[in-house]
Amino acid sequence: MTTHNPLSVLSDLPLPLAPPDPVGRSAPHSAGGTGALEASAVDLHPGSGLNAGDSSELLGRPPEPEQSHQDASAHLPVRLQDSLFTAHKVGLTGQAWRSYIRDQALVPMMMGVYREEKVPDSPLLRAFCLAELTPPDYLYRIRFSRKTAAWVLGYISDPPDHRLDVDYDKTNRTNLPRAYRARFATHQSSFYPFDSAALGPITVTTPLRTALDLLLYYEDVEAIQAVRSILLGTANSVTPEIFRAYATHTNNLPSHIHDRAMYLAQEAELTLSERGARRG
């Protein structure tokens, strides 16, 4: 009798969604930073308030390490480059900066970054907002992850309050400049091509990896709801079956996290089934 491999659904995905597999078996995963075999499309769930038209084809192959921040920014729409403001960028401080914000009707995004009111919020704009807060030379040495990734992808509506979660490759130790360290929470990880995706000027964890990270490192309602949004999303490839398989084949995953992943996957399947029945 043939044994069913729950990861077999991944091999049916068109490249580049599934990596080359010369021996016909998936590489083992680990909870500390393993590869996720999943598509890199962004899912904009209805509650995020993001503009889906601004987000097509944004997530793809992670950029090469030697690519410069200036090269990446050159490909961004000029209106996006010019639509974000900080006190340092404008060259104002104190009351002069506050007056500028009021006169220009700027909308706060996060950590002192503002946007023009006429420019709609979107994953790309959020990505560029994070780039404004990051040393340019470090953009391709770190990967935004956890709740920061969930925010930039649109699964969490409120931006991080205090620190930005970023991963660095365990084979390439990264020490951020002292002036930036208080702004970032850095985490050692292993970088694999299908764990990461390029989004404008930054690299971010894929929705599949983000979902598992949220279960691993948080227990609050916001994180659980973000996982539900990822599993129920229609624009990414994270189905309940794929999420269940990913969690099952992740090495060193705590049993209670595995059980929680199984529960949420089953819950999502029931929700999707009910939606299909109503449409029918």
Image (tube, helix red, strand yellow):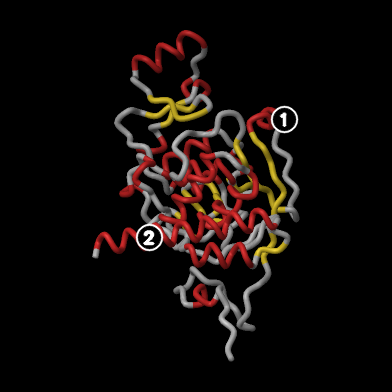
Residue farthest along the bottom direction in this orientation: 1
**Image coordinates for residue 163, horizontal then vertical, percent:** 61, 32
Which one is nearer the viewer's eye here, 40 or 275? 275
* Kind of element beneath mark 1: helix
* Kind of element beneath mark 2: helix
* 199 over 80 or under it: above or below: below
Which badge, 1 or 2, comes first in the chain's sequence?
1
Mark 1 residue type: Arg
**Image coordinates for residue 13, horizontal then vertical, percent:** 46, 73
Say which quarter of the image contains residue 139: top right
Q: Which mark is residue 2?
A: none
Q: Is residue 268 left or right of residue 28?
A: left
* 110 over 41 or under it: above or below: above
Q: Which mark is residue 272?
A: 2
Q: In this view, does 3 lie to the left or right of 182?
A: left
* 121 over 216 or under it: above or below: above
Residue farthest along the left direction in this orientation: 280
Which one is nearer the viewer's eye here, 20 or 92? 20
Count of numbered badges drawn on the protein = 2
Viewer-side label of 1, 2: 2
Residue at coordinates 61% horizontally, 54% vertically from top-left?
66
**Image coordinates for residue 102, horizontal then vertical, percent:** 37, 15
Residue at coordinates 43% horizontally, 25% vertically from top-left?
108
Mark 2 residue type: Leu
Quadrant containing the C terminus in the rendered view: bottom left
Q: Residue 178 carries which label?
A: 1
Q: Are marks 1 and 2 in contact (CB under 8 Å)?
A: no
